[in-house]
Image: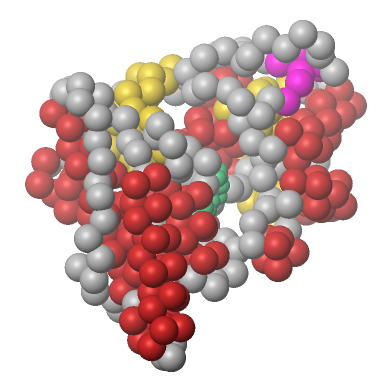
Amino acid sequence: MADYILGIESSCDETAAAVVRDGRKLCSNIIRSSAPIHEKYGGVVPEIASRSHLEAIVPVVAEALSEAGISFSDLSAVGVCTGPGLLGSLLVGVSAAKMLAFASEKPLISVHHLAAHIAANYLVAPELEPPFLALVVSGAHSHIVAVDSYTNFRILARTRDDAPGEAYDKISREMGLAYPGGPKLDKLAREGNTEALELPQSSFQDSLDFSFSGIKTASLNALNKAKQMSRRRQCTREQILSNKDLAASFQSAVVSVLISHLELALDQGSWEKLAIAGGVSANSHLREEAEALAERRGLNLYLPPLNLCTDNAAMTAAQAYYQFRDKDFAPLNQNATANWELGQSFPKTRKRL
Ligand code: KG4
Ligand code: ZN
């Protein structure tokens, strides 16, 4: 008999619910984003995000079930993202999931947000099975992960400062682009000169860890210098440093760091498969460079389609299915957490809800 899992995701500004069959087949995938409201603030306002989740969660879940053509009684489990993310936002999804699991007497499954991002690949690649190497790049994280099994993860590299998505959003905000700037900067970069700015690409000795703060700071400094110069010369900032050139130089430096660290990680293992995941995996240059890397190294490359790169609940349901198979059920007093290391058990909190 098929197992239908309802997934719920509310870790940032997307309220999402989805139904997935046997961890692989997408039956519905509903996403409501509050990003347009955050636009005018230049970034996600946590309080507004939580309130938007409260308004959206019930209709979004109802729509996910109705589009899948099933009811609560057909579900095998309810999977929910319990962290990491914005605590107030996470709590809305977690509370809804607990209520649904309790009322329908189905197991509750606590899913790590980054494990879910990786699992987005299962929805489009039926042949993909662990072990494989994954690069997870999002608004808040940048990890190279050894996916040893569906439920066992080892972090081989992490960012020591900014996440790439965070840097994309910050630079684009300073360029005058609306939140989220990542996709807009990506588009501009296609037409710019990657060598307009020389940006520092730092790395650490004896470590695969990333650092993006140097690239971010140097880009912001170049932008501010161009603004000052334009005032002195009475011309526009774009005449001195165009958004296209800044975007192209920034994007080229970020992707070059990501790919070179992936190369090093590949040198240290005997990987045959590489998966890319997270919001920044929608980036066109990263996708091209990952394809070139896979070609050079004879790897099978897995990239989610664009709608499954950024936050969604289909990925949550896909990952929850593999935890369901392991009977990795969460208690009905399950909490949410802002911080949770991938590959570790859910952090112990003094007080449970
Ligand atoms: O995974 P995600 O939806 O949320 C987090 O878990 O953080 O990632 C969102 C991030 C944002 O920073 C957004 O600007 C970035 O992914 N992003 C992109 C692109 N599409 C989304 N960054 C670069 N290029 C893109 N095409
Ligand atoms: Zn995410």
Q: Residue furthest bottom?
A: 234
- Residue 330 % position (x, y): 71, 16
Is residue 177 located in the magenta-colored stretch of the structure? no
Q: Is residue 208 above or below residue 346?
A: below
Q: Evaluate whether residue 8 shows in this view.
A: no
- Residue 84 % position (x, y): 61, 31
Left or right of 222? Residue 138 is right
Q: Residue 299 lies in what quarter of the image?
A: top left
Q: Evaluate whether residue 208 shows in this view.
A: yes
Q: Main secondary structure of the magenta part?
A: loop
Q: Residue 18 lies in what quarter of the image?
A: top right
Viewer-proximal residue, 10 or 84? 84
Left or right of 148? Residue 199 is left
Q: Which residues are magenta?
A: 330-336
Question: Which of the image's four quarters has the N terminus?
Answer: top right
Left or right of 150? Residue 294 is left
Left or right of 146? Residue 40 is right
Q: Is residue 7 above or below residue 293?
A: above
Q: Is residue 67 above or below residue 103?
A: below
Q: Residue at x 26, y 41 (%)?
A: 202
Q: Residue at x 10, y 47 (%)?
A: 296
